[in-house]
Image (cartoon, rainbow, N blue to C red):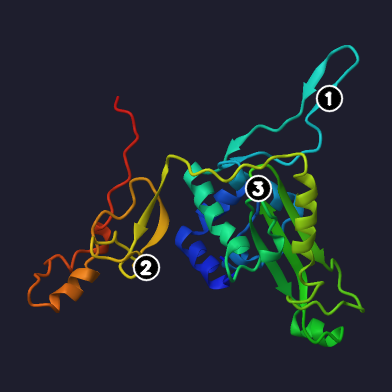
Amino acid sequence: METSRNVTAVKAFQEVGINKAKAFGERLGIKLDTIEEAYSIGGFKTGVSSFQMAGAYGAFGNNGTYNAPHTVSKVEWTDGKVMELTPKKVVAMKDYTAFMITDILRTVIEGVDGTGRLAAIPGIQIAGKTGSSNFTEEEKKQYNISDGIKDSWFVGYSTELTTSVWTGYGTNADGYIDTNPGSIEGQLAKRLFKEIMTYAHKERVAASFKQPNSVVRIGIEPSSGRIPSNSDSSSKIIYEYFVAGTQPVKESNESKKDDNKNPGKKQNDDDDDKDDEDKVKPPNNKKKK
């Protein structure tokens, strides 16, 4: 996600499947009659509005609870009668899903190669995602465009607020600005997001994203995906989040393989353990009758 690779999004969609992806979108206020693989990278036939995107992304910053975007929360009459108009909250996902997606989307802002680095706000943790669409070859020829992007998006959030920004052209016409991704115009969505969110947080204190109890953070050896052995140096270890109960529990054999080159050391004979044995099963939280 840090570098906005389309392949990653498509593969995730394929793993989840159309039905689950569609249902997840509906819980976030995005209701679609049909859904295709291209939708995973924004290849919509009809698309969604920035209003809908703000509502959907807000759920990730709200521990998985979706609040439908609205402008009026209640109406009060002079006789004291009150009509509550705040939409009902919907638990759209588990808190661990919201947190782990947020952790991934933070790399878009904070990563060395993050495509959303211009949206970073000093002192405020932000998670978000960039997006763009291209002109077709026919459009380039028709409107004399050498290069550029037709639409540019940035949707991001803190623990307090969510903002969705779209810049681009709603209709085809002559006189398009040649907006390549690296130009000022091509970066406009991120710049607007930063200005809006900086101003909106002047009187709000946004807390850092909090790791829920359903998530654990452990060190692993990247080459094996297992927990490091005692002989591993700290330079070999990276730290990752896991849903509690699914984290690796077996020790890496990489060091042991190296040790085998030394006749004075004995290699463990469990090198051929299956990957699915490296993890413990998630806890069964069902209550007994």
Give the Cα separation between the discs numbered 2 and 1: 59 Å
Residue type indicated by callout 1: Val
Pick whichever, 195 or 236, lies toward us. Answer: 236
Q: Give the residue type at disc 3.
A: Ser
Q: The C terminus lies in which quarter of the figure? A: top left
Instruction: Spot the residue most to the top.
Output: 79
At 34% across and 50% down in the image, what residue appears? 246
Q: Which of marks 2 and 1 is nearer the N terminus?
A: 1
Q: In this view, does 80 lie above or below 220?
A: above
- The kind of secondary structure element at disc 3 is loop
Relative to 7, is 31 on the left or the right?
A: right
Identify the disc placed on residue 163. Answer: none
Of tags 2 and 1, the one toward the viewer is 2
Q: Mark 2 points at which residue?
A: 235
Using the image, determine if residue 213 lies above or below residue 34: above
The one nearer the camera, 18 or 130, is: 130
Local crowd size for mark 3, using a 10 Å CA cut-off: few (<14), some (14–19), many (≥20): many
Whichever of callouts 2 and 3 sits on the residue coming sooner in the sequence is: 3
Q: Which mark is residue 158?
A: 3
Q: Where is residue 48 in the image (x, y as percent from the top left)?
A: 72, 56
- Residue 57: x and y in percent read 64, 50
Q: Is residue 195 visible?
A: yes
Q: Do the residues labelled 2 and 3 touch (CB within 8 Å)?
A: no
| Labels 3 and 1: the sequence-earlier one | 1
Separation of residues labelled 3 and 1 (CA atoms) = 28 Å
Are there few (<14), some (14-19), or many (20+) residues within 10 Å of tag 2? few
At x 70%, y 55%, the residue is 121
Residue at which label 1 appears: 75
Q: Tell me the element at label 2.
A: helix
Q: Specify the amino acid type for callout 2.
A: Ser
Q: Can residue 30 be seen in this view?
A: no
